[in-house]
Image (tube, helix red, strand yellow):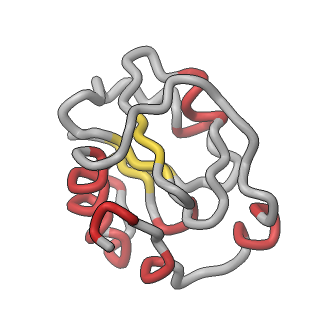
């Protein structure tokens, strides 16, 4: 089992989760964070740190978020590791309340 960053993180990028991760399993894209399933040690310390509830244990993922298992694995292989907290995106508070954001993931590696 691993932990998965879901759609709620798109256009938010709060990094509270990054600062508590003991193994640097988070990777950062332009408008989204992902967890590398090969690095994650399944400790779960990131889950309560996410202010918008965007991180789930794989076994607890809501059905509509199952695609994010593959999305996290694929993008973690493309994006750089982030090992320190930073500022969220400028309009993160607005985007935190928006749903159906999967198509808005910005991935210049595939552009």
Corner quadrant of residue 85? top right
Residue 65 at x, y percent in the picture: 36, 70
Of all residues shown, which one is farthest toward the top? 22
Corner quadrant of residue 19? top right
Residue under the point 31% across and 61% down: 109
Q: Is residue 10 left or right of residue 27?
A: right
Could you say which is closer to the camera, residue 49 or residue 82?
A: 82
Screen quadrant of the C terminus: bottom left
Q: Is residue 53 left or right of residue 83?
A: right
Total count of labels: 0
Corner quadrant of residue 50? top right
Residue 104 at x, y percent in the picture: 50, 78
Could you say which is closer to the camera, residue 47 or residue 73?
A: 73
Residue under the point 59% across and 81% down: 99
Screen quadrant of the N terminus: top left
Query: Looking at the picture, does residue 96 appear above or below residue 34?
Result: below
Residue under the point 40% across and 48% down: 34
Query: Looking at the picture, does residue 100 appear above or below residue 95?
Result: below
Residue 68 at x, y percent in the picture: 32, 64
Residue under the point 36% across and 78% down: 64
Residue 57 at x, y percent in the picture: 36, 46
């Amino acid at each position: 089992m691993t932990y998965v960053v879901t759609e709620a993180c798109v256009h938010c990028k709060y990094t509270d989760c990054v600062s508590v991760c003991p193994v640097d399993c988070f990777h950062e894209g332009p408008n989204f964070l992902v967890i590398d399933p090969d690095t994650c040690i399944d400790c779960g310390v990131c889950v309560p740190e996410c202010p918008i509830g965007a991180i789930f244990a794989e076994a607890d993922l809501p059905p509509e978020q199952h695609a994010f298992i593959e999305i996290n694995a694929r993008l973690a292989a493309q994006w750089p590791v982030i090992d320190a907290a930073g500022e969220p995106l400028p309009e993160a508070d607005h985007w935190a309340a928006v749903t159906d954001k999967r198509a808005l993931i910005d991935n210049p590696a595939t552009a």
